[in-house]
Image (cartoon, rainbow, N blue to C red):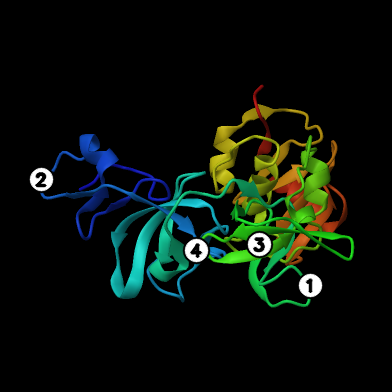
Amino acid sequence: MSPDLDSRVHAIDDATRTAEAALRPQLKDDGWTFVTPTPALAGNARVSLRAAPSATAAQVSEALPGEALELLWDGPAGWQRARTLHDGYLGWVQRDAVSTGQPGELRVTALRAHAYAGPKVSQPVVAELCLGSRVAPADGEIVEEQGRRWVPVRLPDGTGAWVQEVVLAPLGTVDAAALALRFLDTPYVWGGRSAWGLDCSGLTQVVVAQCGHALPRDADQQHAALRAVESPRRGDLAFFPGHVGLMLDASRMIHANATHMRVTVETLGEGDYGRRLAASLEGYGRWTA
């Protein structure tokens, strides 16, 4: 039997006796097949990480276009066990949804964006991008068209495309609460990590990443990663059983939730939902300097 390891971040399969090579020192039994991960990228679309190698299995997380992955071992019918490198989270992905190569140097800073076949908004959309997506610069010059500046890029699969320069504009100094408020009314999607749809810990992880802090994927992991504080301030996280939100001040919280099926603001202790949240509050967390 394998030791007690968190299957969300430790790649191990008791049924097939397969594990990632990094676990070799912890697995004392004979008969294990150890696999060395190979690098990959999420492709031109968001890639679902699923709980099992099936399109009907729950989505446990999402890799954004161009994000770095590791591929571990093959599953049935074109599925592969994979890990998102930024948080070490595991799931099953369809092999044809990923690409090879290095992450692009250009980061998308728009919440949602489109890549086009040519430098004009009437051209076909060839990819949906989002905050945190990565693309690479392509050969060619910026094209100016009706006051718009179009940048030639390469999508994760190497395809050429065009994006408006504004979707790549640096965010500058980021206030986590202000950025989170830009996601207001974004649809709730279990396992989602983008402004096309996200869950509670997806919202906090994506927002906090723009502030230069790396957070784990799930709410309980984020709770364990932060320093506990008694009195919250703007930008702190609030934790509940299986849930997390970001504080706007000492009492108001923004969160992606399945009650409203979207990103909303609640005041803890006010209204029916606010009172239920306050009653289940487990504590607040803050990044250490």
User: Sequence order check: which comes first, mark 4 or mark 1?
Assistant: 1
> Is 152 placed above or below 116 here?
above
Discs 3, 2 touching: Cβ within 8 Å: no
User: Sequence order check: which comes first, mark 4 or mark 3?
Assistant: 3
Q: Which is nearer the eye, 106 or 119?
A: 119
> Is 145 placed above or below 242 here?
below
Disc nearest the viewer among 3 and 2: 3
* Inter-mark Cα distance, 4 to 1: 22 Å
* Inter-mark Cα distance, 4 to 2: 40 Å
Of the residues shown, which amino acid type is indicated by label 1?
Val
Secondary structure beneath dot 4 equals loop
Rendering coords of residue 67 (x, y %): 53, 52
Q: Which residue is mark 4?
A: 157
Discs 4, 1 touching: Cβ within 8 Å: no
User: Sequence order check: which comes first, mark 4 or mark 2?
Assistant: 2
Disc nearest the viewer among 4 and 3: 4
Quarter of the C terminus within the rendering: top right
> Is 157 placed above or below 22 here?
below
Of the residues shown, which amino acid type is indicated by label 4?
Asp
Secondary structure beneath dot 3 equals strand
User: Sequence order check: which comes first, mark 3 or mark 1?
Assistant: 1
> Is 177 placed above or below 17 here?
above
Q: Which residue is mark 2?
A: 30
| Within-10-Å neighbours for mark 4: few <14, some 14–19, many 20+ | some
